[in-house]
Image: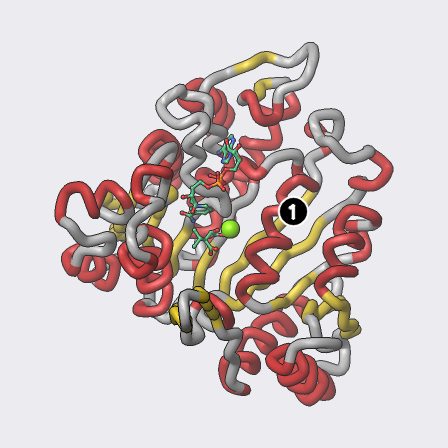
């Protein structure tokens, strides 16, 4: 079986980390008898520079004709001052997600024993943390009407948080089902004390809950959730929330595994799944071989599991990463005294050694 992977490195550290995930997929392929074709496409700032478009039509076509997509990161200061709709984030990543129907963004977050001391949080707080954030990805503030108006010299700008019942239902059902395969706890995060879209969100969760009688459902306001993530992250199993809240909360939750460079993601819902680290193009460390490739490698593991149902292969990658961390190898973002500092490629070398 040959799996066709669309490879979109993008900007900044994207071009450094994506090749690492490909090396790991190739090693997995050799070991387990799978084959992959990797076809590169342009996206983001580099696509603007080369074609004038943040999401060229060929890239979208490549993605549509692939079995899965591996994306690095997009954006950076060079393109920040472009008009909103031409910027890499709004002009490429959002339409890619929307066009492919990727409404469900899965961001698993757990504590690594080996990294307990690398974290900025106390060991006792982190102990046993294992949650998955299910973020709605094609609605809300990112996609509602937005605009600007100049009225008598006063600038006004707006974004609209819009959700329909079907949009909420499909993501909430996925969250209930995910909880059913885990510890059977679902926390729905909203701002129903203020926002109308959150009231509809909460009503929808409550309406569906009786269909999933074995799942314990709770609701939490997003401000409280931000605090509880740090106070007692072990209380969460599955968290479901709308687009913007999920974006912010997942960056925060990444610190439960010690670094944003550890947080993988899968975007699902259409025919083709998209796999990318949750982090961005990290302009502050780009081109310095400092980037942690683990979030991208773990995203490739999610690809094997979710798009190809290759669960043993995904577990093998995760186990290899745990072993490398246990042996004390660290990129700068997770470095601590007494450990061995490695660069992006060397971290992958160690993972490949474990896989072999
Ligand atoms: N999915 C995406 O492509 C994506 C996601 C987030 C941000 N962005 C874009 O990336 C650009 C930079 O945004 P930002 O700086 O706010 O967020 P960022 O996620 O790029 O970086 C935040 C911080 O985390 C560090 N970091 C991130 N990934 C790392 C890794 N793998 N290893 C080690 N350290 C890592 C960075 O060095 C930086 O200090 C912006 O243009 C933003 O819009 C893109
Ligand atoms: C770059 C940006 C549009 C994107 C988002 O907010 O979805 C990123 O922060 C992410 O988390 O994937
Ligand atoms: Mg984000």
Q: Residue at x 41, y 21 (%)?
A: 289
Between residue 338 and residue 85, name the one nearer to us: 85
Counting from the top left corner in percent of width and height, residue 115 is at 69, 29
> In this rendering, would 331 be left or right of 153?
right
Instruction: Find the residue positioned furthest to the right.
Output: 124
* Residue 67 vertical position relative to residue 253 in the rendered view, above or below: below
Instruction: Find the residue positioned furthest to the front.
Output: 152
> In this rendering, would 336 be left or right of 303?
right
Colour scheme: secondary structure
Report the label total: 1
Counting from the top left corner in percent of width and height, residue 119 is at 71, 31
Q: Residue at x 26, y 50 (%)?
A: 6
Q: Residue at x 81, y 56 (%)?
A: 235
* Residue 348 vertical position relative to residue 217 in the rendered view, above or below: above
Between residue 6 and residue 197, name the one nearer to us: 197
Residue underneath mark 1 = 252
Q: Secondary structure at mark 1?
A: helix
Dot 1 crowding, Cα within 10 Å, few <14, some 14–19, many 20+:
some
Q: Is residue 77 visible?
A: yes
Q: Is residue 27 visible?
A: no
Counting from the top left corner in percent of width and height, residue 218 is at 78, 72
Between residue 304 and residue 282, name the one nearer to us: 282
Counting from the top left corner in percent of width and height, residue 154 is at 45, 66
């Amino acid at each position: 079986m040959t799996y066709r992977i669309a490879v979109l490195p993008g900007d900044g550290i994207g071009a450094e980390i994506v090749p690492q995930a490909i090396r790991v997929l190739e090693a997995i392929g050799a070991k387990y008898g799978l084959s992959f074709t990797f076809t590169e496409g342009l996206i983001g700032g580099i696509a603007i520079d080369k074609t004038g478009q943040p999401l060229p039509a060929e890239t979208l076509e490549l993605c549509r004709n692939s079995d899965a997509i591996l994306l690095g990161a997009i954006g950076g200061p060079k393109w920040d001052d472009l008009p909103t709709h031409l910027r890499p984030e709004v002009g490429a990543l959002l339409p890619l997600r929307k066009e492919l129907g990727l409404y469900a963004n899965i961001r698993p977050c757990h504590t690594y024993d080996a990294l307990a001391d690398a974290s900025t949080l106390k060991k006792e707080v982190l102990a046993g943390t294992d949650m998955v954030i299910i973020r709605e990805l094609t609605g809300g503030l990112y996609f509602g009407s937005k605009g600007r108006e100049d009225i008598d010299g006063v600038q006004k700008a707006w974004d609209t948080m819009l959700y329909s019942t079907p949009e909420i239902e499909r993501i909430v059902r996925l969250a209930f089902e995910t909880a059913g395969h885990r510890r059977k706890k679902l926390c729905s995060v909203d701002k129903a004390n203020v926002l109308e879209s959150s009231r509809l969100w909460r009503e929808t969760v409550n309406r569906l809950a009786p269909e999933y009688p074995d799942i314990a459902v709770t609701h939490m306001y997003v401000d409280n959730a931000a605090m509880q993530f740090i106070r007692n992250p072990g209380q969460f199993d599955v968290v479901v929330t709308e687009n913007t809240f999920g974006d912010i909360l997942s960056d925060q939750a990444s610190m439960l595994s010690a670094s944003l460079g550890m947080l993988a993601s899968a975007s699902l819902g259409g025919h083709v799944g998209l796999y990318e680290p949750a982090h961005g193009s990290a302009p502050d460390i780009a081109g310095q071989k400092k980037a942690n490739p683990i979030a991208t490698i773990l995203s490739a593991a999610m690809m094997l599991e979710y798009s190809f149902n290759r669960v043993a292969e995904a577990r093998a990658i995760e186990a290899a990463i745990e072993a490398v961390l246990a042996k004390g190898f660290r990129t700068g973002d997770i470095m601590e005294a007494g450990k061995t500092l490695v660069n992006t490629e060397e971290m992958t070398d160690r993972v490949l050694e474990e896989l072999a």
